[in-house]
Image (tube, rainbow, N blue to C red):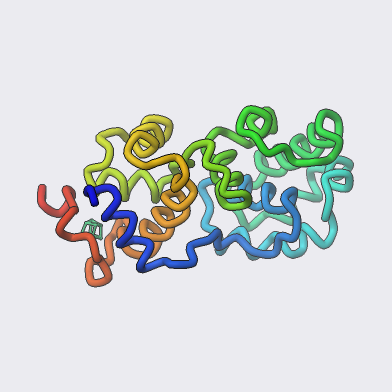
Amino acid sequence: MNKSQTILKKIESLFPDAKSELGNWKTPFQFLICIILSAQTTDKKVNTVTSKLFDKYPTSKKLSMANISDIEELIAGVNYFKSKAKYLVETAQTLETNFGGVVPDTVDELIRLKGVGIKTANVFLNDLYKKNEGIGADTHVIRVAQRMGLTKHSDPKKVALDLQKLYPQEVWHRVNSTFVLYGRYVCKARMNESRCILKEYCSYCKDK
Ligand code: SF4
């Protein structure tokens, strides 16, 4: 087993049921809304606003007709709530107009929605469908990949490409979900070294 495979195996042993920590969603549409809201915001914070948001606007049809000021009020706890309120309504309108109210399941189509970039699209598709079109490199994935010496880049697209070269496509969704949790709970910006099971592979600590 090579280094990248060993790292994945060890992280998976710590998070055997790795899945998104975004809650309150019942449909692909609601999950997509959660992911858009989670940019630059913790999942915990997103979870505090989505219950009321989905009670009032459970579908793209309802959200497409919402007043942006009402959405701002409902999601005021999350960072950049003003821009995100606009994105949510525009996304719902695009879904209604161009996709018949059904959230698409390809990166190319998803990135036509406001507030959805390649990273968001891949996280959505990997978490929901294990789609493996690509790896969504968020801040946690980037930090873990860098510290493990799996990439020298910090640009999310370049980090994703490096990881996609290292891992077979059928495990990309697993890399995505487990690296996020390892970065969130162990290999944090201020790391929790006592829980670290990867010290021997860690370029970051060796270089210190
Ligand atoms: S030793 Fe620290 S930086 Fe290195 S992998 Fe472990 S938690 Fe991350």
| Image point (65%, 47%), residue name | 81
The residue closer to the viewer here, 23 or 1, is: 1
Percent position (x, y) of residue 106? 64, 34
Specify the quadrant of the image occupied by residue 117.
top right
Percent position (x, y) of residue 144? 31, 50
Percent position (x, y) of residue 133? 53, 36
| Image point (28%, 54%), residue name | 7
User: Which residue occupies the extreme bottom position in the image?
Assistant: 194
| Image point (82%, 28%), residue name | 98
Ligand 1: which quarter?
Answer: bottom left
The residue closer to the viewer here, 57 or 126, is: 126
Percent position (x, y) of residue 174? 45, 52
Specify the quadrant of the image occupied by residue 168.
top left
The residue closer to the viewer here, 116 or 124, is: 124
Q: Is residue 159 above or below residue 124?
A: above
| Image point (36%, 56%), residue name | 183
